[in-house]
Amino acid sequence: MALRSRYKGPAQSGPPNADPAAARLVAVTLLARRDHSSGELHEKLRGRGFEAETARAVLADLAGAGLLNEARYVESHVTSRANRGLGPVRIGAELRKNGVAQPLIEAGLSAPDWVGLARKVRRSKFGAQPPADWSEKARQARFLQYRGFSADHIRAATGADPDID
């Protein structure tokens, strides 16, 4: 018996379920816990044994009723992940993985002050003093890069502006 890394509800046994009422109930229950992207919710419904067409119809119905809103999901996700100290590169990759359209991602990532957040994250990890030498700047830059900040944000946070000749 294979072990699953995350519990996703009861394992599917038998033919795919085509009951839209049951799919809607599962989808609304999932949305009651937190916002989901339509791609993420579609995968969860498919994982619970619902047919792809049934899942698409339920998602269209939920979007029409205002219960499934991609823009609200993006805003919530960006705010949540930025509050954890993650940068726009990493958050954007997560949103793309969850099936969010690129224009919504760009709109959601335009709101926060990423340079200020990169400085705050650097300060909380390494202290108030700026890095003294290039090896320390590189170490801090690698940390900020892992967190998902761009090179411009990292240079501003570490004070590693290149010398202009």
Image (tube, rainbow, N blue to C red):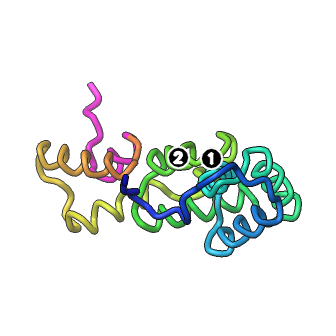
Q: Is residue 98 found left or right of 21 in the rendered image?
A: left
Residue at label 2? 92
In the rendered view of the protein, which quadrant contains the N terminus? bottom left
Point out the tag, 2 or 1, that comes first from the N-terminus. Answer: 2
Q: Position of residue 18 (x, y in %)?
A: 79, 53
12 is higher (above) or lower (below) than 165: below
In this view of the protein, which residue sits in the foreground, 113 or 6? 6
Q: Secondary structure at mark 1?
A: helix
Numbered label attached to residue 81 = none
In the rendered image, is residue 37 in sight?
A: no
Q: Residues within 10 Å of mark 1 (few under 14, many from 20)?
A: many
Q: Give the amino acid at mark 2.
A: Gly
6 is higher (above) or lower (below) than 102: below
Q: Does residue 161 belong to the magenta stretch? A: yes
Q: Is residue 104 found left or right of 90 in the rendered image?
A: right
In this view of the protein, which residue sits in the foreground, 120 or 78? 78
Stretch in magenta: 151-165
Which residue is depicted at the point 26% across and 51% down? 143
Numbered label attached to residue 105 = 1
In this view of the protein, which residue sits in the foreground, 17 or 101? 17
Which residue is depicted at the point 69% across and 41% down? 103
Q: Residues within 10 Å of mark 2 (few under 14, many from 20)?
A: many
Q: Position of residue 84 (x, y in %)?
A: 42, 66
User: Is disc 2 in contact with disc 1, using a CB cutoff of under 8 Å?
Assistant: yes
Q: Give the amino acid at mark 1.
A: Ile
Q: Is residue 160 found left or right of 66 in the rendered image?
A: left
In the rendered image, is residue 164 in sight?
A: yes
Q: Secondary structure at mark 2?
A: helix
